[in-house]
Image: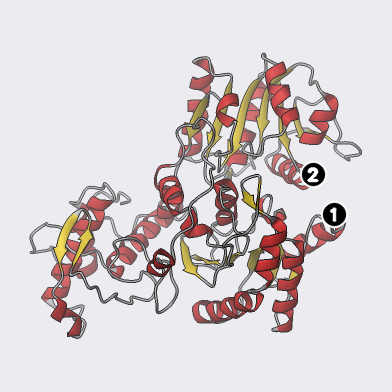
Amino acid sequence: MSGESSATGGLVLRDYQEASLSALREGFAGGHRVQMLYAPTGSGKTESAISLMQATAEKGNRVAMVLDRRVLCDQTSGRLEKYGIDHGVLMAGHWRYRPDRHVQVCSAQTLEARGSFPDLRLLIVDEAHTTRQSTIDFIKNNPRVRVVGLSASPFTKGLGDIYTNVINATTTRALVDTGQLSSLRVFIATPIDMAGAKKVGGEWSAAEATERGIKITGDVVTEWTKKTHEIFGEPRKTIVFSAGVAHGKDLAQGFNAAGHNFISISYKDDDDFKAEVLADFSRADTKITGIIATDILTKGVDQADVCIGISARPFTKSFSSHVQQLGRVMRPHPAKEYSIWLDHSGNYLRFLDQWDELYESGVSALHEGGDEKPKPEPTDKEKEAAKCPKCGGFWPRNADSCPYCGHVHVKRNAVVAVAGVLTELNPSAKKKAPESSESSEYKMAWYQGMVALLRQRGKNDGQAYYLYRAKFGVAPPWKKKSGVITLDVMNYLQQANIAYAKSQKAKGGESPQTMSGGNRV
């Protein structure tokens, strides 16, 4: 959940949501009329916006939230109703057309047609990275209206000319560490070959991407079938981002021929048909295993029980679209421990540096000219080095083993970088059987690996003492120095953080591993 209801149905915000709203108010007080609120997909931007709308209306002022799709207007109206907030929806023929209400939900097309909005005090722009000229003109032509843009990917060109201040609500890592977003297991799959493909406006031609994407339909179906059974033991809900409409239809035929119910939807389909398909897919007992689309699934599809995402639409510069796609599978759900991302587009490696920075730090500034420029294609050697030869999983830089299957690279160079420290590996050690979890060698390596991991993440390395004691039942007798970060060390820290987060949600509950004062690490 991205927001919570009180016992009386009112909206209760999380700490970071409250902090971001306070920062917005400070920004307005400091002279920033038009501000951007960044937060990851699934963090509750809509709930933050609803809180702003409610506070504005309670002061007797008019507020509107503008969205670029009818379905998103309906969803937002439903959220407002859930929290007991009286409002109207400004769209032609809408059953909730109540233009006298202080709170309004409005489609971008309606705002464009109206051209004005009398007595409006605050405008909230959803998906603000998708810039519409009519919305930009409205902002510029109404200097008395305060504006808040909402985005999980504010990287498109021109945003810095509109929004003068950025509020960084939280980061993807923080939400993953606390269990408020699902972690991703990324697999580098058979890629679409875009070498020499024509570009239009800096992006690969949709026609060429579709033609080349169809060539690997069999690989997409085969690799999905293998992973969903290997990891989950059965097919799980999946969304697929295709290279184009024809590619989507071809993928649907391929999945259905293999005995799986996948449905392709596109802008060419009737709106009622698309709404029916998405409503059916959202049910827990749906018979639809997967939905395939090019753009439709990047907005308004917030189904937490989707476990697998397939990227089969290559981008050369659209980092915003890549981030939006990843966010579709990262919502937490009791039925999934993590989400799976099968990358057939090459996007994950193409945007890896940007994604790593966004994941760790969020967004604190809008760069002049935007952050979306064509990316150089990784070499074949770089592509091979980035995936595990055994399971195809993404291999993090400087890791000495695959985080998914534990496979160890046989390195020609016996020196690897670990947490900023060069650690020499003993080549003969690879021939030995794994150390027993009860051996002193294992325990020392585990403790010193945890010290290294905490230091790498900028945490207090003294927490390693409490984590060791929680795991082994005794205090660590080893020297507190950096060691090799192994898979079981990373997994233990992640599970400890998840357990702590869950304990905080339980009324009067205590973390099962108190560590140092019960703090998350």
User: Residue 339 location, x and y as percent?
Assistant: 52, 65
Residue 440 visible here = yes
As drawn, is 277 to the left or to the right of 171?
Answer: right
Q: Which mark is residue 237?
A: none
Give the amino acid at mark 1.
Answer: Asp
Measured along the vertical axis of the image, is residue 27 above or below residue 158?
Answer: above
Q: What element carries label 1?
A: helix
Circle 2 is placed at which residue position? 70
Q: Which residue lies furthest to the right in this view?
A: 93
The residue positioned 70% from the left and 56% from the top of the image is: 206
Residue at (41% x, 46% y) in the render:
357
Side (left or right) of 451 relative to 151: left
Q: Answer few, some or many: residues within 10 Å of disc 2's Cα (few below 14, many 20 plus, some between 14 and 19).
A: some
Q: How crowded is mark 1: few (under 14 residues within 10 Å), some or many (20 or more)?
A: some
Q: In which quarter of the image is residue 84?
A: top right
Q: Which of 67 and 1 is in front in this view?
A: 67
Q: How many marks?
A: 2
At 33% from the left and 75% from the top, the residue drawn is 406
Contact between marks 2 and 1 (CB within 8 A): the answer is yes
Instruction: Identify the residue under disc 1.
Output: 271
Question: Of residues 359 and 375, which is closer to you in this image?
Answer: 375
Residue 66 placement (x, y as % from top left) = 72, 34
Q: In this view, does 401 lie above or below 125?
A: below
Model colouring: secondary structure
Image coords of residue 19 (percent x, y): 46, 32
Q: Which of 502 and 479 is in front in this view?
A: 479
